[in-house]
Image (cartoon, coloured by chain):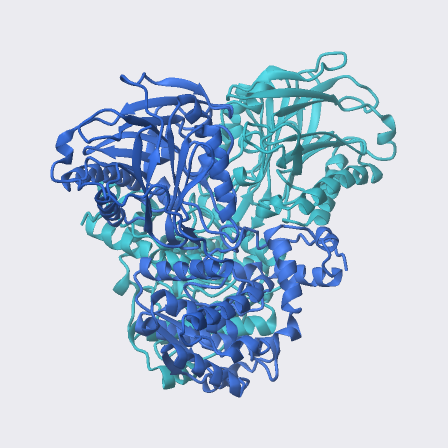
Chain colours: A blue, B cyan
Amino acid sequence: MPTLRIALAQINSTVGDLAGNAAAIVEWTRRAAGRGARLVVFPEMMLTGYPVEDLALRASFIDASIEALGALASRLADEGLGGTAVVTGYLGRHVGPPPRPGQPAEGAVNGAALLHGGRVLVTSAKHHLPNYGVFDEYRYFLPGDRLPVARLPCGEPWQAEPAVDVATAVCEDLWQDGGPVAVTRRAGAGLLVVPNASPYERGKGDARLELCVRRAREAGATLAYVNMMGGQDELVFDGDSIIVDAAGRLLARGPQLEEALVVTDLDLPAAGPGAPSADTPADAHDGTTMTIHRVTVPVDPTLFVDSVPPADPAGSAPGPVWPRLAPLAEVYAALVTGVRDYVRKNSFRSVILGLSGGIDSALTATIAADAIGADAVHVVLMPSEYSSGHSVADAEDLVKRQGLHERTAPIQPIVDAFQADLQVTGLAAENLQARVRGVVLMSLSNAGGHLVLTTGNKSEIATGYSTLYGDSAGGFAPIKDVPKTLVWELARWRNEEAARRGETPPIPENSILKPPSAELAPGQLDTDTLPDYTALDAILDDYIVEDMGAAQLAAAGHDPALVDRVIAMVDHAEYKRRQYPPGPKITPRNFGRDRRLPISNRWREPRVG
Amino acid sequence: MPTLRIALAQINSTVGDLAGNAAAIVEWTRRAAGRGARLVVFPEMMLTGYPVEDLALRASFIDASIEALGALASRLADEGLGGTAVVTGYLGRHVGPPPRPGQPAEGAVNGAALLHGGRVLVTSAKHHLPNYGVFDEYRYFLPGDRLPVARLPCGEPWQAEPAVDVATAVCEDLWQDGGPVAVTRRAGAGLLVVPNASPYERGKGDARLELCVRRAREAGATLAYVNMMGGQDELVFDGDSIIVDAAGRLLARGPQLEEALVVTDLDLPAAGPGAPSADTPADAHDGTTMTIHRVTVPVDPTLFVDSVPPADPAGSAPGPVWPRLAPLAEVYAALVTGVRDYVRKNSFRSVILGLSGGIDSALTATIAADAIGADAVHVVLMPSEYSSGHSVADAEDLVKRQGLHERTAPIQPIVDAFQADLQVTGLAAENLQARVRGVVLMSLSNAGGHLVLTTGNKSEIATGYSTLYGDSAGGFAPIKDVPKTLVWELARWRNEEAARRGETPPIPENSILKPPSAELAPGQLDTDTLPDYTALDAILDDYIVEDMGAAQLAAAGHDPALVDRVIAMVDHAEYKRRQYPPGPKITPRNFGRDRRLPISNRWREPRVG
């Protein structure tokens, strides 16, 4: 059996940054070649970033992506990397007969390309287009019906044999039955490489491995799954690339939530001798016919002169298999990645947030400091007449533990100035305080160029326990998809992690232990308005993530009266969520891309309480 | 040829309000029966409202819709309307073999049902699912492959003959080639009825008539197109129902942007004698096979006892054809409808907005007063040290002309209170004033229960010439999709309209004529920051609606330097738009459902200037 050294580059990509993404492909190809890899696989739509949303509808952007792909192929060769085969995702265009009846003859595709020897050797397009959850790919892409199978020499650089046949599919092509996986078996390819941009969700990791095992067996081929790494608005791609052999055995696995190059040696069946056959149609077992399109990666010894160093004798076979993160470490890393990339990709250098002494802003500040460094985190203490003494003390304790930039802005004189004219009371007066704080933060953001971080958690956003333009003001909301009970767990975990490393726990114990309060009225506690958070979060998860109706929620064992109360709060708050800033998705259903409800909506679940 | 008296009920529906929508169907069926109609057709998803978005994923809501449909059939019969055939849209469920390979065996459908004699006689589902622009129907629905053809007796109530064969399709089924239209011809149906929920766009009206003419000819049948009327969040459905005969001649047309019953007598080919055949498969000429499913509407004289009055001898054949609105009248009516329904469907009774003396807030207030009555419109004058004398005078002039509720809240003392601590300057100081106004409006909204209307126009929102949580604060933004040049046109048109009716023009001439200014700095004018609005709006339309790239914009004749400048402003403001309130869509591409771009986005069109 011939051996192929493959590298999976699970790296970060920035939407729209064609030059930057191409430079990253060149750089990581150099590293892979330096370790003797003959094939490097990059994530789905690596060249354009993912998801590009309506940029996929703009002709100028599709043109630019296709042009950048050609330029990238040339540049790789110019930099002495032409002998390394590179598979990367990009935004392409279909021109030809409509792929399906009723579809147009021209449109964007979610493309994959094999680059070698300065040329784009073959292109293909994602066959199965996801259009659920956070995905809208029917809106953007035409499906691809070609399975490219590249005959790749993997022995000495100047010899055509031995060679292996390498097929390419894209992301969702693994998740649906039939299509490229079925056709890979038919084509007899020894390796199926799959670029992905698969967003992080709690607990999704094992589903991916199980899927890879199943599909490798179905394809009768070794399967190399490479996933993007990094944050893009609401989504966090978590790496976790996987290689399994045709028998479903795990050969290598990349780290979670880190950029990495997973290099390994694969023993693969030798491709048959002679030139490959012409295009062959194949039943894709999903109601469509695909074309097996075979190409040969040419042998060109000149490509290797002065370029590829001898393979690292330390090699990489089998493995490596990076250790998996524990559940809380995984979530925390996803939040840090989401914040870091939102800041960086939007060209901010610093963030600002209000620090109340409570757990939400304490955790948000800690995530921010871990993401971009404490020196780039500015906090504002904005006490009012209802702030308790411990609030200020706890906030200052956190500032000292982490070395953040602190500023105090008492809001009472400003609230008084509003009240001199408005004289509002009750909830309006509570909201007024929150909005004054929002304006202070936005003003300091404008003046200092900081990104405002919003500190609301998912329980609060779900129930509408927040003030529009008040505590909900900001550009990015790090814990938007984190239920309150998980906020506490993460805070405890982060402190324990610090203790384990011999560092000062960043979050004051008192912020974790004290009963939560918005402190907008005398002696106010969250529990005056909201149910106990354990019961609340359990209902919210079943209502929001599982989409249960009231009867189902009651049948699932939740207190019926509480079910009625919680559902009413959630339904009423849709208008607030619509104007909430984005934040990283960590659950199977976040507010935003994942859960899309009308504001004008009279549907009310029948009462069960 | 037998004659069928048909009624198209182009009426309003509220998302989620199953009881209210069912009651409307009963009420309008009563009116139709009272005018002798034997068939009443309601809009797409009339029973649930449209679009229901992710409610279509919730099992409890689908169940409730199906249950409500059965209850509606019974109720119609109970109220003596069982003899009138009713076609209505609803949210249904497909259970059975997956409609297409790879699709699930169970899922929601965009359903249509024929109710008669207390029963749901036949159901079907939309075949072509739109997934572009504002539509996301691949996310929600499985496609239907059944064409129902109902043999409907149309002579004396107790006689089975003469009868006509009536097929049903849904909305997008008309816009795509093949499918129900092709199969209607094959089935030999004499009439094709088509419930729609088709949103208003400027200039779309003629496209609809042309489409109906083309499809009627293709189907070889008279075609009755009934469209929903009313606002739902961003969308405004504009009625404008159409009937054309098989030769493509216009027989009747409903009014635009008004609820109405279009009643007309159709001469239709008689259905053949005897019982209809069983289900027949038919090539749908779109790559799918559909089933022709024939049913007979039974003759049951008891249904007519005490119920159907004699047909109105005045009849309705041919016509009526309502006159079409002029272009500006049409836009204005759409905006009024959007505001009225957002207010009503979200259970508000009044609105509040800031009145600056400028044209945007003047037009917004006027639309609001036309939508819900001047007595429900509260305006707040919030002068600052930079407000010119004419600003207050113009605002007060408008208040007097229309009889609005007025309040003045000078913002300077509040701005001073902020500045005592913050001491911000430049843009931050300008934004501060806007945000103080935002807080004042939100506080008065909280205290008085008014909906805050946001007064920004599309040119401003496109270029980011607005302050997040400042002038962009609010629940609904009536002129969000109205470019500034159209704002002026609409204001002039509304004044001329008033003059034509002998009423006081509602908008002070000075608000229309004076150069626009945000008045956040001394002597400030929009043109200090923005290009001339005529040039700006032309570029914005080509960039946003037409999705042209920079090179195309330059080639289209726009000033290249201006193209670069405008594109940069638009691209940079995406984060502000993401948190902007919804407003009625009137152009082919609004910000929101129609144009969805990432915030983290480094794509910049190559410079052309």
**Where does the N terminus of chain A fall, quadrant-wise?**
top left
Residue A176 image point, x, y percent: 50, 34
Query: Residue A130: in sight, yes or no?
Result: no
Closer to the camera in the image, B138 or B440:
B138
Closer to the camera in the image, B59 or B113:
B59
Determine whether A130 is above or below B367 in the image.
Answer: above
* Residue B530 appears left or right of B155: left
Look at 34% across and 35% down and name the residue there.
Answer: A266
Residue A157 image point, x, y percent: 19, 31
* Residue A444 appears left or right of A604: left
Look at 39% across and 62% down and name the residue there.
Answer: A339
**Where does the C terminus of chain A fall, quadrant-wise?**
bottom right
Closer to the camera in the image, A269 or A529:
A269
- Figure disc tally: 0
Determine whether B186 is above or below B342 in the image.
Answer: above
Closer to the camera in the image, A218 or B494:
A218
